[in-house]
Image: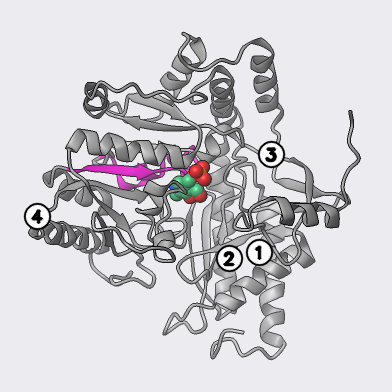
Amino acid sequence: MAQQRLSKEETLDRRLKLIGQSCRLFYSDDPVKILRARGQYLFDENGTRYLDCISNVQHVGHCHPSITKAAAAQMDLLNTNSRFLHDNIVRYAERLASTLPKKLCVFYFVNSGSEANDLALRLARQYTQHEDVVVLDHAYHGHLTSLIDISPYKFRKLTGQKEWVHVAPLPDTYRGRYRENHPNPGQAYADTVKDLIEEVHSRGRKICAFFAESLPSVGGQLILPQGYSAKVAEYVHSAGGVFVADEVQTGFGRVGSHFWAFQLQGEDFCPDIVTMGKPMGNGHPLACVATTVEIAGAFTANGVEYFNTFGGNPVSCAIGLAVLDVIEEEDLRGNALKVGAHLKDLLTELQTRHQTIGDVRGVGLFVGLELVQDREQKTPATKTAALVVKRLKEEDRICVSTDGPWESVVKFKPPMCFSMDDAKVVAKCIDRILTDISASGLRLGKEDI
Ligand SMILES: Cc1ncc(COP(=O)(O)O)c(C=O)c1O
């Protein structure tokens, strides 16, 4: 029976009562109620259109007709768990394998990025028989207990750091320990991991894995310096550990030039485990772990079955296949390269006129705009960033959000169909808002508003 639609106020009221308060809404002061979406656009209950600059989940575009069609057709035919033989799971694994280096040829399908990272941890532990994990500062790897433990972004606010977790500095060449003017920041930051491993060894502990996003997102939309990952992998391997690349936010062509963001680090680097999620199912819960024959073999050898009720079911895999098809057919990697470069150029031009823009960085449609109170000290302009987010939503119906240790980086990770015109509109609106903020007497450059 068709139900009458709730008013926005009623929905909010009921949600506050029924849904755990820690499940926060975007724009919690004045949430947006979205009823439908298409491409890079969201529409609220009044039909007002919002430009989505942050959904790295609806990767090929919201409600893409090819994805909906593939999902509905497979649902109409069969959906079972993956213990029956079915073509979709093998076809999908083959297609994923063709995007990855040859050694990453065994797949485990799961339902979320968190499940993928938790399984990666289990695989690493089983293979290495070691326990300790090195992670990057401010990293987030998921919401399961095991992953809160390896996510400084979360555990710092909770019970703190476990004895088996070790935090390496973020390789941030804008405001970190080694900056753009360093002759070899990749090597220098990799050596911080080497030092950490030596310290761990001196305490009689052993390294199981190094976990990192291929482009630290929560850490502030950072681009790893060249040479970093290959060097870290060398150090981690000689300590008997494995390198886990978290591609949950960054995979599936977002960087444009490559299918996976870890490939930006060059051909001499290949992780031992890659985890994927968000964009994989275009909104359908689909995630995966890819690894080597050796690591998978060690996991099998423990004799315990790995069973995941929903992971890799025929519908999920049909959707995954359709996503890969759309990325190719619509040349979304090419679009990410072209539109991402244009967005970066437009924002870089704004930087010449707005002192508050400290840095513009990114690859493909993974772009960050770091706001500072003054360019010399690089003091984060957290409040300005929050105001930009709020005004873009209220005045221009553009959805962006912030990231980074001080929430001072305005991030852009839109659906991959984001257009040149969308980029122009976004830059124009940011220009107007920053001009207005500084003209209204808010002394940017001296203090955050
Ligand atoms: C880098 C990274 N890894 C893992 C996860 C966890 O994914 P999920 O929310 O699908 O469990 C997230 C989610 O934001 C993420 O950003």
Say few, some or many: other residues with alpha carbon within 10 Å of mark 3 (under 14 / 14 to 19 / 20 or more). many
Q: Give me the C-alpha separation between circle 3 and circle 2.
A: 25 Å
Residue 118 shows in the view = yes
Mark before the other along the chain sequence, 3 or 2? 3
Binning the other alpha carbons within 10 Å of mark 2 as few (below 14), some (14 to 19) or many (20 upward) gives many
Location of mark 3 (residue): 62
Relative to 85, residue 111 above or below: below
Q: Mark 3, mark 2: which one is toward the viewer?
A: 3
Q: CA distance from mark 2 to mark 1?
A: 6 Å
Establish whether ligand 1 lies closer than 8 Å to the Cβ of label 1: no
Q: Which residue is mark 1?
A: 427
Left or right? Give the position of 77 relative to 292.
right
Apparent side of residue 117 relative to residue 346 in the rendered image (left or right): left
Residue 112 percent coordinates (x, y)? 50, 38
Q: Dots 4 and 2: beta carbons under 8 Å?
A: no
Quadrant (top left, top right, bottom left, bottom right) of the C terminus:
bottom right
Label 4, label 2: how far apart the Cα atoms are: 49 Å
Residue at (14% x, 49% y) in the render: 206
| Residue at mark 2 | 347
